[in-house]
Image: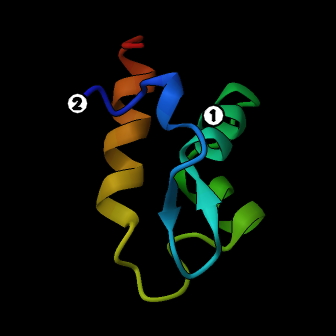
Amino acid sequence: MNILDPELADEIICPCSGTTRGNIVELHAQGKDLDGISRWTGAVSGCGGCEWDIAEMLKALNEGQN
């Protein structure tokens, strides 16, 4: 599975905040890092279970994978 697959854009990556994979991609494109995404969406600030998944997405986006 390609974690940046556009078909997965509506998949919720953070159940606590309802943040989707598409939200992460859009916010990364706006220049937000993990901390900025957390502040904007509330992701990572609840149970923290999504932190690894979001960090992996950001790593892939930074490496230019899509």
Q: Which image quadrant for residue 32?
A: top right
Residue lying at 67% horizontally and 74% vertically, measured from the top left: 42
Query: In this image, 21 relative to 17: left or right?
Result: left
Query: In this image, 13 relative to 40: left or right?
Result: left
| Disc 2, SS | loop
Asked which colour scheme the image uses, the reply is rainbow
Dots 2 and 1: beta carbons under 8 Å?
no
Which quadrant is the N terminus positioned in? top left
In this rendering, the answer to whether 16 lies above or below 55 is below
Label 1 Cα crowd, 10 Å radius (few <14 / some 14-19 / many 20+): some
Residue lying at 57% horizontally and 37% vertically, measured from the top left: 9
Q: Tell me the number on the disc at residue 1.
A: 2
Q: Which image quadrant for residue 27?
A: top right
Q: Which image quadrant for residue 60?
A: top left
- Comparing 1 with 34, the one in front is 1
Which quadrant is the C terminus positioned in? top left
**What's the residue type where badge 1 is placed?**
His
Where residue 34 sits: x, y (%)? Answer: 53, 53
Q: Earlier in the sequence, mark 2 or mark 1?
A: 2
**What's the residue type where badge 2 is placed?**
Met
Q: Tell me the number on the disc at residue 28.
A: 1
Where residue 15 sits: x, y (%)? Answer: 52, 75
Where residue 3 sits: x, y (%)? Answer: 34, 33
Where residue 11 sits: x, y (%)? Answer: 51, 51
Residue lying at 67% horizontally and 45% vertically, measured from the top left: 23
In this rendering, the answer to whether 29 lies above or below 24 is above
In this rendering, the answer to whether 34 lies above or below 1 is below
In this rendering, the answer to whether 63 lies above or below 57 is above
Query: In this image, 50 relative to 16: left or right?
Result: left
Residue most extreme to the left? 1
Distance in Å between CA atoms under marks 2 and 1: 20 Å
